[in-house]
Structure formats: C-alpha cells, structure tokens
C-alpha cells in the first residue's frame, strides 16, 4: 500500500499551518473534546486515590446511611434543562400524578389527590466534589399506609438519586439553563425506574442511558479501592471472571484477604496519593500470575465481570454497592467520570 | 396520512360546519355536494391528487360505501328476493371502510339514525353501531338526533346499552359538547333503568360540569345508592359531585377506590387508537418533506416509549413550574406564546418565530419540517445543545453494533438513520451529533450494517479541518475500503464526492456571508482551502490504490472520474480559489482505458480544468496585485503535461515523446512497428469500433476496411460522426484544446503570464 503523502504543490497560498481557533460555541467545544477523547487514550493514565471530601461533612448522616449497603443500578444522564431546586415540591406533586396516571393507563383516575403513593424530592446537601458541582438530590416513592389513623409514611418502594462529583469537564461546556447531574443511581423495580425516567426525560429534556462498566474500568476500581485505607475490613476482596463457553458460561471467583490485597498493592504502588495505569496493569498481572501458578488458567483471557472490596463492589452490568462511608465521594467521583465519558 | 385522505377530511370538516349552521345534515343535501355535477368539488379534488390510480381505487371504495349508505337509508326492500345477501354485502362494505379508514361524520349521522330508528332488526342495528368509527370527528348534532330516537322507544334495550357504550368510547371525538350537555337532565333520568345505569353513569361522569350538580340530583343519586348498594359507577359520579360541591354531599366515600369504569371491555379499543393517530397526523405541510416515522415500532420497549423520536409536545409545564401560584385559567389562556400544536404552515412560523413555544423534548423536531427550519436558523445555544444531547445519546443507545444480540432492532435503527439523513438533506447541513457518533462508531463498524445510511452520514460531516478528522474517520474508513468489495469502494467514493460537494457549498455560502455571521470555525479562507485540497488528495490516493487492487476496473474508474468532475469545476462553480488535478495513476488509466465513455469523461474533465485554469489566470491578470490565492506554476505545468500527453496520443499521433515519455529503445523492443498512431482517435482501442462503423456507413459494400484511410476531409467527417454518437466530452475537448490548422498542436496554458 502506498504511503499517503499530500503533495506540497497545490494552493501555494496556504503555507501557514491551519489556524482553526475552534471554540466559538459550546457545541464546537464539545466536538473538539470528543475528537481529543477519541484520538487519544480514552482515560487519563493516572488518577487520585479516593479521598475523604471536606464537603461530605455536611451530608446528613442518616441520608448517607440510607445510600450505603444498597445495590444501585447506574445510569448516565445528560444535563437537565430548566431544572430548579426551588421547585422540588412542585416536582413531587407532578411526578406523583404522572406515576398514578401511568399505572392506571386507560382507567378513570379519581379526581383529587388521594393517591396511595407519595413522591418526595429532597436535596443531598454536600454530596459533591467541588463547590461548583450542583447539589445532588434524592427522589423517593413511598407507599402510603393503608390505615387512615396511621398517618405516617409507609415503606420505601423506590429510590433514585442524581449527583455530580468533580464534573468540571461537563460543567464547562453547558450554559446556566442546564443542571449537570450526569450520574443517576436507582434502587427499586425497573418498571418504576422507567416511569420516573420517562417523566424526567419529558420534563427536563434529558436522556438516561444505562451505564455499564467494562473490564478495563473494573480493574481501575479494583486497584483504587484496594489502595484506600480502611479502618476495619468488612468484606474480602473478591473478583469474578466469566469464561464464555457453552452450554453455560463458567464463572471463576477469586477471593483474597483484603490485607493481602493491600500488601500486594503497597508493594507495587510508588507515588503516594496517585494511581497510574502501569500500576493498575501490574496489580492485575500479579493476580493473574498467582492464579496461573496454582490453577494453570490464564485469567487474562477471560472477562472480569465483578469486583468487590470493603470500599464498594461493582458489576459490569452497571450495578454498584457502596460499603464505606469514608470513600463515598471518591467512588462517586469515578462513576461520575464514567458517566460524563458516556454522554460526551 | 396521504394527501388524498387529508383532502377528504378537510372536506368533511367543511361539511360539518355547514351542517351545524343549518341543522340539515341529511343525506340528500350531502349527496348533491358529492355528486359528479359539482365541478368545483371535482376540480379541487383533481388538483390535489396527482396520483390517478390511487384516487381511482379510493373512489371505488367510496362509491360502494355511498351505495351502502343509500341502501340503508331507503330501508329494507321487502319484495327483493336476495334481500339478505344485499344487506350482508352492504353491511360488510360499511364495516370494512369503518375499520380501515373510519367514516365521515355525515355517514355516521345517517347510519346512526338508521341504527336507532329500528328500521332493521336488532342484529343489524348492533352491527351498524359497532362500526360507527369516525374518520376524524363525530358531529354533535348526530349525537343529539340519535338521543332523540331513544325517547321514542323504537330500539331494544340492548341497542340502547350499546349506544351509551359507544357514546362513552367516542366521547373525545365529538366535535362540540354544549348541545349534549343540555340533555343532561334526560341522561340523568335514564339512570333509573338498571341496565343502562352503569353506562349512563360513565357518560355523566364525562359530561358533568359544576353547574350540573344540583341538590335534587344528589338526593336522587343517594337514593339510587341506597337501593342498589355501593356500586362503583355510582360512587364515581358521587365523588365527582362531591368534588364540585363538597357541601352538598356529607356521606363519606371510600378513598382507595380507583377503578370505577372498566374500560378494558371497550369494543373500540383498536379503532380509537387508529382515530387518535389519524387526528394527530402530520401537519398539512408540503408533503415532499414527510419526515414522520415510517411506522410505529412494534416492540414495546423497556422505557415504554413508542418510537425512538419523542412525540411533539409543547413545553408548557417546565415553564409553568417556574412560576408559582399559576392558576388553571392562566395556564389555558397563556397569551404571548404560540403553541406548537397550532403551527401548520411556514408563514405561521415566520409570524410567530419570536414567541414560539418550544417542544418539551427537542428530539421531536426531527419529525417536523417546520421546526427543523427553526432549529436551522436559531442561534439559541440551549436549543441546539438539547437537540445535540438527545441525538447523540439516542444514536449511541440505538446503534446496533454496540451491543451483542441487539440485531432485532436493526430495521428500526435503519429507519431512524434514514429519518436523520432526510432531515440533514432537508436542512442541507450535517448535525454535530452525527459526526461525534461516527467518530465513536466507525472503528467498530463492520462495513455491512446500514451501509448506505452510514456512508450518507459520512457525506454530511460538517466542514472541518481535514487533518483533524482524518485519524478519527478516514483512516478507519480506508481500512474498510481496501479490504472490501469493489461495490463498497464505489459507494465510499460516491459518498466522498457528496462530502466534497457539501463542503464546497458550505464554503461558498460562507464566503458570501462572511461579513454578516461569524462562522463556527473561524478559519481563514486559506485554511479552508487547504482542508478541501487535502480531502481531494486523500481521495486521489484512495483511488489510485483502489485502481491497482481492482485491476483497473472500468466500473470503479467511472466513480473516480465522477469525483473529479466535481473537483475540476471548483473554481468556476463554487467560486473558490482551488484547482487540484488528478493523480497520474488515474489520468493514464483513463487515457488508456478500453471504454469509450471513460475516455469521453476524461476529455470533459480536461476541458473543464482548462476552463477553470483559464478563468483563474484571467482573474490574476485583472487583479494584478499578488493575491493570496495565485495557483502555483506547478499546477499549470501539470495540466499542460497531461494535455500534451492527451493531444499527442489522440490527435497528433506522437505519443510517448512529450507527456508520457517512454524510451524509444523500449518501444522498439516491443516489436510493435506502428505504435505512433496506435492511440489516436482512430486506432485507440476504445475508438476503433467507431472508426470501423464509420467506414462501413460510408461504403457498406466494402469487404475490407482500412481505418488508416481516414485522413484529410474524411478525418473531420469522422470527428463529426464521433460527436454525433454522443461523445460530447470529446467534442468540447477538441474544440477547446486543439488548433484546427494543418499541423495540429496542443493548446497549452501559458503559465508565465505571457500569451
């Protein structure tokens, strides 16, 4: 094949280098960043070890406790148009009506506001990385108590929350009409997620897409979370690989004592406070070779599908469970990064 | 909706308005209007229906329906022998039309009358009632008349029940309801009929206004409830009454009850959907711009939206949310903004462009050509961003080769891409989202899936720096290009030709508008020209390599020359200072081609290059000042070199001297003695057959033809013969580039500013 060379001969005028001063409009800026992302390695080769955020102190501990130890399904979300934090009450009312209407499609709806569910919007103050990040907020659907005398809220049917932790790259490219909360986490029946997602899409012209985590990012999570200093380990470090074979795929689980994992990491890790791509690769390679020595199986030829540590556990399907209060913000920061990457 | 259909509906609506003025919607009045004597109607019909066949079929169905309606109106003919057969036939006709397209409001008016008047038997009445499906709307007067039949007690109880059920189901399609509301008392009285009660309750539930709630009615309802027990339908009506007049009703009603009326047993469920769809239908807009989704997606998707593209809704509620304490009437009579639902024509758009209520989901503009106009000219960043985000994410989500096992949505994705491409063609502008999508998806593309759509998206990439786009896009495309079939290569070249054309159009517009708007890419003209020239050189490189891979295929060469037909005319056609010649690999392949049409195309391209270069030279001389865009002498040299080769081969029979130079020793070694004239217009392999048929035409009896005899006068006769055979390119080339003197010589373009 010929090497491709542009002859210098043609328009003699354009001798100067192309001076495309791009960036006139946000759209242009966005396209520019996409070009950069696509042409270079998609993720930066180094990241910070998750740290405890100052802002996190403001978060209502009850609410944080509520978010921990639950399995969340991840979605990425494009910026919300004309969303206003001062209207949360109104949104609760509208969403409530919408859900009732959706569930009773085709049936006469009772006039008035006697619904058997209740929707609550509330902010999660402090759940962010920088002051610039917009406030996270929580949406809950509660079932109303059957008995009129017992006028307290019943059990939680569905929960979802929207957040943005260190979302600077996204924030820079949108105007003030938009609220950037690129990460959405849901817990509850998927039919509910669909109804609520539809309402948000209709009301704020945004778009939800399921956020899956590929093996490459799972390795990063494994390394970063192993690097975290945890006071007392609550879970073993566990990896799950999937071997695609018929008739049923084969799963290989690999559990390590968290202190051993940490010791391995410390032997690899060089720069304090930072994790690099080489370190992540080396960490995984060490695990692979250890496994190979014992079982003669090359794990590198299989697919990493789940990582669990004492900090959090993540599945390639886009499911996450955060266990450690201290590193909540750190975990969310990485998830926000993935979500932003998906919507850019 | 087809144009024919719409015309019909417009007519139907006219009729309704006429009818309601005079209270005379009898069939006879209507029939006269329908009759063939009404020339005005016909001519109108004709104008709007260019497609004759379709209309014909439509007319036939209409005739059959009209006959059926007439038959029912006359009533059963007692003496007729095959009465049942005729009846059955007409019933079938009505049913078919009704379920397929719905009935016009006049037809419903007539048939409803018949069904309730008891002319026919119960079974027939039931069948008629069941197919009272409106094409668009039902006239209020028809309903009022039908109700009046109920008073005279001509129809059976079951027919009455069915009528009420029908009324409830069709309630939303009745054009106005004031008159019906006046009959509130009558309906209320019918509650006493036990069989009717549930349905009448439902009707009243839909009909009740605040002023209808009276103490005596409340009392009556409570009496009924005491008599019949807690019936859900009665409760529904009571709770509605309580809502309107809480002071009148002191009984406590259970709060948890939700289902009052079982709509699931609705007989007309499918028909209702169809009517809704018809009524929603696209705006009466120029129909060539039909951008609507081809069909509704069959699969119920996870996020329960029916189609990928959201439905057009104005964004009333996001806006209202901002303002607290907005009363309902304020909401309804919002002044100042123009609701999208009313936007039907381009002049309307122009008049209201400043106060247009934008859709709640920007993606819905893709189906609306008027709003596409709006998107195109609006400089409002949020609008564009919303659209950008929606389109980017949707493309990413729907793209079938991103996900394994997602191929069942293939057809849908293809349709979606088609819609996008239609919108891009309509706007004559590419979307940034599509470009971003191509960057991400092209490296994963197999080159087969949605090929035509994908390559069209490539041709709509907005103008940008070629060197930036190349590694993201063209390098991936090249890999597929070289490893795929010749047909793929041709389609790629075709779409690159369209890309070039789009860029050129964009740039030529941009030059004209420069003082007014600031272009998104603030580049210098030199930068832009450089980018275009790089694209052309890139395609030149692709083509040269492809020619070698496909062993000089004529088919491929056609596509390549098509591309250069665009390239050679840039200076004149687009008024852009750029002339790029084709690479030698293409030029010589075309010159030595065995195909006459290729050679003819080559001649045409050379002719156009000459025109462009001459025009450029002229402008340089006029302007005198050293402009930024003087072409280098190398371009002229290159052109002259090609020209010399061509004239040397085709005309002067002196090939391989100037132009293509081949060492005479090598030529001798080939053993071909008469090589000198072997490439001229007579002996060139692609012309030889023309020369022979020319001679045979001259003297048909000749056993042997000597093509070398074409000389002198015969030479120019021969040329005329060639021109008459459709070789226009050759004609233009010879006329412009060859001196008609005794010694033919090439007319080169002088590049030293001297003629």
Image: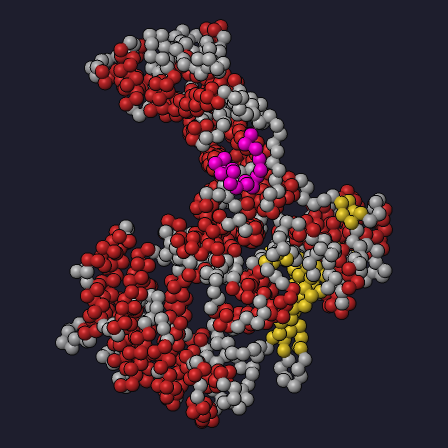
Q: In this view, does B487 lie above or below B731?
A: below
Q: Which residue is drawn at 38% across and 62% down?
A: B278
Can residue A256 be spotted in the picture? no
Quarter of the picture holding the N terminus of chain B: bottom left
Query: Is residue B516 one of those drawn in magenta?
Result: yes
Residue at the farthest left position: B79
| Between B243 and B322, the one nearer to me in the picture | B322
| Between B450 and B617, the one nearer to me in the picture | B617
Q: Is residue B76 above or below residue A216?
A: below
| Between B17 and B62, the one nearer to me in the picture | B17
| Magenta-highlighted residues | B510-526
Q: Which residue is drawn at 65% across and 41% down?
A: A36
The location of residue B665, given as percent across then percent down, is 49, 5
Main SS class of the magenta portion in the image: loop
Query: Is residue B215 one of those drawn in magenta?
Result: no
Can residue A219 be spotted in the picture? yes
Q: Residue at x 40, y 72 (%)?
A: B172
The answer to which quarter of the image holds residue A268 is top right
Name the side, left or right, on which B95 lies relative to B299.
left
The location of residue B283, given as percent across then percent down, is 39, 57
Name the side, left or right, on which B20 lies relative to B345.
left
Q: Residue at x 58, y 42 (%)?
A: B439
The location of residue A86, given as percent across then percent down, is 64, 66
The location of residue B335, given as percent across then percent down, is 47, 65
């Amino acid at each position: 094949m010929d090497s491709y060379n542009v002859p210098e001969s043609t328009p003699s005028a354009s001798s100067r280098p192309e001076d495309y001063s791009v960036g006139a409009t946000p759209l242009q800026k966005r396209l520019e960043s996409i070009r950069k992302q696509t042409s270079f390695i998609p993720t930066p080769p180094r990241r910070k070890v998750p740290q405890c955020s100052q802002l996190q102190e403001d978060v209502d501990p009850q609410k944080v406790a509520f978010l921990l130890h639950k399995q969340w399904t991840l979605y990425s979300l494009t910026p919300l148009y004309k969303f206003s934090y001062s209207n949360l009450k109104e949104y609760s009312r509208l969403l409530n009506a919408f859900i009732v209407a959706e569930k009773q499609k085709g049936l006469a709806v009772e006039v008035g506001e006697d619904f058997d569910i209740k929707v609550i919007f509330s902010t999660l103050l402090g759940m962010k990385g920088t002051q610039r990040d917009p406030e996270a907020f929580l949406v809950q659907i509660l079932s109303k108590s059957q008995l009129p005398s017992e006028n307290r809220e019943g059990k939680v049917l569905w929960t979802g929350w929207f957040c943005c932790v260190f979302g600077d790259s996204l924030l820079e490219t949108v105007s003030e009409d938009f609220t950037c909360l690129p990460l959405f986490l849901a817990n509850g029946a998927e039919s509910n997620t669909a109804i609520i997602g539809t309402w948000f899409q209709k009301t704020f012209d945004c778009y939800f897409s399921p956020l899956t985590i590929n093996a490459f990012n799972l390795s990063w999570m494994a390394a970063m979370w192993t690097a975290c200093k945890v006071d007392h380990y609550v879970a073993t470090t566990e990896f799950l690989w999937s071997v695609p074979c018929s008739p049923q795929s084969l799963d290989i689980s690999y559990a390590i004592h968290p202190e051993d994992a940490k010791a391995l990491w410390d032997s690899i890790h060089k720069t304090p406070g930072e994790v690099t791509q080489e370190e992540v690769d080396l960490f995984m390679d060490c695990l692979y070779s250890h496994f190979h020595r014992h079982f003669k199986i090359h794990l590198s030829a299989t697919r990493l599908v789940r990582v669990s540590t004492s900090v959090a556990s993540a599945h390639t399907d886009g499911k996450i469970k955060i266990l450690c209060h201290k590193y909540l913000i750190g975990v969310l920061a990485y998830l926000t990064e993935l979500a932003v990457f998906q919507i850019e | 909706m087809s144009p024919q259909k719409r015309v019909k509906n417009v007519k139907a609506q006219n009729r309704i308005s006429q009818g309601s003025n005079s209270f005379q919607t009898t069939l006879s009045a209507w029939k006269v209007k329908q009759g063939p004597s009404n020339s005005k109607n016909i001519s109108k019909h004709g104008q709007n229906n260019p497609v004759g066949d379709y209309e014909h079929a439509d007319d036939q169905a209409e005739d059959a329906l009209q006959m059926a309606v007439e038959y029912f109106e006359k009533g059963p003919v007692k003496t007729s022998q095959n009465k049942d057969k005729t009846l059955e036939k007409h019933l079938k006709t009505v049913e078919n039309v009704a379920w397929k397209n719905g009935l016009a409001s006049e037809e419903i008016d007539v048939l409803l009358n018949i069904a309730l008047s008891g002319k026919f038997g119960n079974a027939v009445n039931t069948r008629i009632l069941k197919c009272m499906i409106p094409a668009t709307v039902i006239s209020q007067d028809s309903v009022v008349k039908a109700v009046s039949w109920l008073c005279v007690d001509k129809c059976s109880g079951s027919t009455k029940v069915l009528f009420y059920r029908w009324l409830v189901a069709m309630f939303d399609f009745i054009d106005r309801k004031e008159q019906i509301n006046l009959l509130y008392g009558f309906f209320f009285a019918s509650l006493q009929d036990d069989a009717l009660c549930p349905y009448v309750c439902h009707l009243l539930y839909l009909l009740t206004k605040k002023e209808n709630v009276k103490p005596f009615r409340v009392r009556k309802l409570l009496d009924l409830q005491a008599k019949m027990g807690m019936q859900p339908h009665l409760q529904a009506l009571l709770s509605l009454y309580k809502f309107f007049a809480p002071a009148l009703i002191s009984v406590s009603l259970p709060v948890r009850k939700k289902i009052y009326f079982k709509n699931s047993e609705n007989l007309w469920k499918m028909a209702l959907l169809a009517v809704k769809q018809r009524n929603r239908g696209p705006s009466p807009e120029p129909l060539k711009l039909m951008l609507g989704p081809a069909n509704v997606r069959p699969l119920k998707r996870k996020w329960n939206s029916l189609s990928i593209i959201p439905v057009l809704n104005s964004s009333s509620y996001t806006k209202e949310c901002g303002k607290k304490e907005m009363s309902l009437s304020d909401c309804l009579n919002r002044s100042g903004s123009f609701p999208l639902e009313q936007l039907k024509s381009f002049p309307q758009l122009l008049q209201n462009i400043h106060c247009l209520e934008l859709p709640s989901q920007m993606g819905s503009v893709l189906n609306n050509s008027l709003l596409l106009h709006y998107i195109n000219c609006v400089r409002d960043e949020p609008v564009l961003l919303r659209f950008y985000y929606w389109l980017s994410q949707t493309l990413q989500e729907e793209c079938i080769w991103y996900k394994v096992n997602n191929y069942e949505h293939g057809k849908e994705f293809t349709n979606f891409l088609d819609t996008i491409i239609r919108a891009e063609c309509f706007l004559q502008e590419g979307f940034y989202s599509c470009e971003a999508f191509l960057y991400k998806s092209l490296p994963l593309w197999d080159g087969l899936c949605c090929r035509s759509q994908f390559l069209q998206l490539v041709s709509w990439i907005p103008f940008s720096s070629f060197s930036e786009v190349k590694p993201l896009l063209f390098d991936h495309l090249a890999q597929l290009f070289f490893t795929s079939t010749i047909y793929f290569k041709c389609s790629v070249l075709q779409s690159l030709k369209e890309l070039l054309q789009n860029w050129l159009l964009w740039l030529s517009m941009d030059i004209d508008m420069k003082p007014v708007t600031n272009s998104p890419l603030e580049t210098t003209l030199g930068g832009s020209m450089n980018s275009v020239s790089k694209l052309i050189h890139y395609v030149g490189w692709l083509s040269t390599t492809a020619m070698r891979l496909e062993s000089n295929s004529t088919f491929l060469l056609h596509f390549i020359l098509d591309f250069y037909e665009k390239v050679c005319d840039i200076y004149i056609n687009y008024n852009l200072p750029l002339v790029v010649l084709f690479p030698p690999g293409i030029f010589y392949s075309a010159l030595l081609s065995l195909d006459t049409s290729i050679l003819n195309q080559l001649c045409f391209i050379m002719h156009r290059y000459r025109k462009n270069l001459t025009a450029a030279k002229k402008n340089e001389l006029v302007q005198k000042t050293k402009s930024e865009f003087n072409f280098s002498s190398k371009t002229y040299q290159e052109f002259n070199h090609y020209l010399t080769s061509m004239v040397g081969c085709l005309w002067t029979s002196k090939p391989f001297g100037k132009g293509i130079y081949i060492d005479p020793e090598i030529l001798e070694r080939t053993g071909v003695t008469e090589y000198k004239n072997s490439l001229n217009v007579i002996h060139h392999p692609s012309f030889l057959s023309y020369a022979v048929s020319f001679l045979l035409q001259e003297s048909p009896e000749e056993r042997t033809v000597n093509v070398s005899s074409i000389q002198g006068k015969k030479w120019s006769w021969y040329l005329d013969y060639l021109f008459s055979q459709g070789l226009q390119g050759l004609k233009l080339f010879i006329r412009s580039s060859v001196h008609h003197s005794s010694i033919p010589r090439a007319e080169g373009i002088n590049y030293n500013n001297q003629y």
